[in-house]
Amino acid sequence: PADLTISVLLAVVVWVILCMCFGMACICVALRMMIDRCCYDIVHSMVITDVADHWNVTQAIVRKSSGSIEECLLLQCAMLAVVLPLMLMDVMAVGSLPGFALGVVPAAVVAGGVLCVLLLAAAVSDKCARVPSLINAMDFGEGTSSARQEIVAYIASSAAGFYVFGVRIHTGMVLKFMYTWCVITVAVASRILVDR
């Protein structure tokens, strides 16, 4: 009965974390679609005077949305930083015992969900970073070259993207995070193997 209670509790915790990951992933995908829609409207309206206003609304929604889920994302990153070394230590401790994979699966699923959310959040910033290039490549008509350059400079300096406590999340940052924790995990695992 005690093992069953722990298993049920673990399943509930993993389910709640995955639901949070799914909700944040949906928000990130919606933000990416909104940026795409903004770019689509800019390309098809071809009116230079509407670009700044349209971008201001899009940028404000992205910033407000990322601010709404930043605490949850930071908490999940901290949890991921703890789960990866523990998962590796669990694999090394249990090793080849029958059924050891069942103990690792929940941690691996949680780690995968959090990494997916981090990559989706970084994709929002990456998509925002490409908007100035799109605007710069467009032709709004004769005599709009200086206005276009002003809009491009304005959008580029707005530095729109997915922010967590004032830090812009981008793909390079997420990959460095993953690399760092993989190195730490391997270092901890090798230290455990040496101590055996």
Image: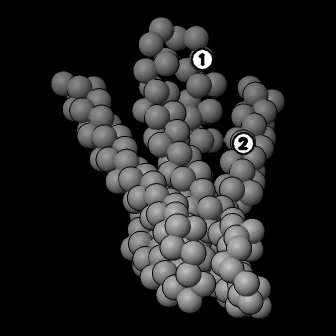
Classify 94 as above or below 180.
above
Residue sitting nearer the eye, 191 or 86:
86
Left of 2 or right of it: where is 93? right
Q: Identify the residue shown where x is 56% and y is 81%.
A: 47
- Residue flagged by tag 2: what amino acid is it? Cys
The residue at which mark 1 appears reads as 95
Work out whether residue 70 can be spotted. Answer: no
Left of 179 or right of it: where is 106? left
Task: Find residue 85 and report its horizontal and vertical position in percent.
Answer: 62, 41
Q: Identify the residue shown where x is 26% and y is 40%.
A: 12
Which numbered disc, 1 or 2, marks the residue that appears first in the sequence?
1
- Where disc 1 sits, the SS reads loop
- Tell me if mark 1 has few (under 14), some (14-19) or many (20+) residues whose alpha carbon lies within 10 angstroms of its own: few
**Which quadrant: the N terminus?**
top left
The residue at which mark 2 appears reads as 182
For residue 169, what is the image quadrant?
bottom right
Q: Residue furthest left?
A: 1
- Residue flagged by tag 1: what amino acid is it? Gly
**Which quadrant: the C terminus?**
top right
Residue sitting nearer the eye, 32 or 190:
32
